[in-house]
Image: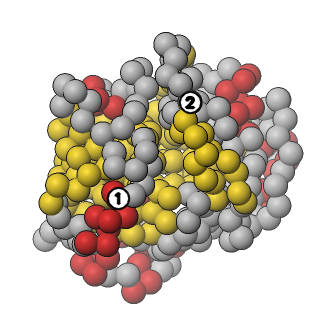
Amino acid sequence: MTNQYGSYHEGELTVQARAGVGSDGLLADQMYRAAMPTGVQRFLSAQQLAVLSTMDAEGRVWASMRSEPPGFLRPLDDRTVEIGGYTHRDDPLMANLTAHPDAGMIVIHLAARHRVRLNGTARAHPDGRILLSTQQVYGNCPQYIQARTVIGNHEVSPTSAHFGKALNRRQRQSIEEADTLFIATAHPHSGADASHRGGNPGFVCVESDKRLLFPDYRGNNMFNSLGNIVSYPRTGLLFPDFQSGSALQLSGSARILWDDPRMKQFEGAQRLVEFDIERVIELPEATLLRFEFQGYSPLLPGTPRAATSEFRSCDAQSGAASPADRSSPD
């Protein structure tokens, strides 16, 4: 690889070839920039929500939320962003950056359905600030983003996070009702990446208290997240509850399912992602922002499915083998 940050790595190329798109004309050196254009810098300065991808000392990947009123993201120059804002004290973000400097960040304006991704290396400061040095900067299309506006702030409370290794009933129901998740992935040489996934409520299927299944819809054919999963399966998911401000952080391993019979459950799915849970952190206040729902993305395939408090039996609906009968991810 001539330029590890300016070209597609082997995992992305593998997925592009398997999908039959060959990046569909999106040349990496034309998509990625190391520096932030002026327009990106202005965008960052006006935003209130970001999600970061980092890795802990044991190699687990996590997705973490940072938020605050406009100004918490402050470009210091065209290659450096100062990240202030709020993160719950039990979020592993700051400890992770001490263990591994690689960081990916997606900054998203939910109401306008705009997003920008910035990947590089980061330093955590004792006062809570993070300095991100950019190596990849690029925009994404507005697909599958549910529109929400910020209408106020919550007060900080002293409530601690709940830690586990499997989902409880309340957490399962929260995932079944979700219309948004953020996915954190990493590559051994190309660094960390954070991305967004959206769908109608029920688009993420809870197969068991330790396994999830969700569709991968048509996107930009770059396959940054899936390419990272091929090269390094350890993955983090973040399920924000925009109404309460809470969130579920999951860390585990993912794999891509290309020809699974359960694809028929997910209208518009190009392939499926199966995620095995290793760690669960339930954050009571992942963000202090209060959001109001405005509407689903007009590009979402299908119609919302009713969520239940029980497991949604993916296998019973599809006739596929149960999770216990299938091999674990590689």
Query: Nearer the viewer's eye, disc 1 or disc 2?
Result: 2
Query: Which quadrant is the C terminus positioned in?
Result: top left
Classify mark 1: residues with Cα within 10 Å, few (<14), some (14-19) or many (20+). Answer: many
Q: Which residue is mark 2?
A: 154
* Percent position of residue 96, x then y: 28, 30
Q: Quadrant of residue 313?
A: top right
Residue drawn at point x = 76 percent, y = 47 percent: 202
Q: Are marks 1 and 2 in contact (CB under 8 Å)?
A: no
Gap in angstroms between the C-alphas marked 1 and 2: 22 Å
* Percent position of residue 103, x then y: 28, 46
Q: Is residue 323 visible?
A: no
Q: Nearer the viewer, residue 312 or 231?
A: 312
Left or right of 244, for residue 100: left
Residue drawn at point x = 74 percent, y = 41 percent: 177
Instruction: Look at the picture and state if 129 lies above or below 291.
Output: above
Q: Quadrant of residue 298?
A: bottom right
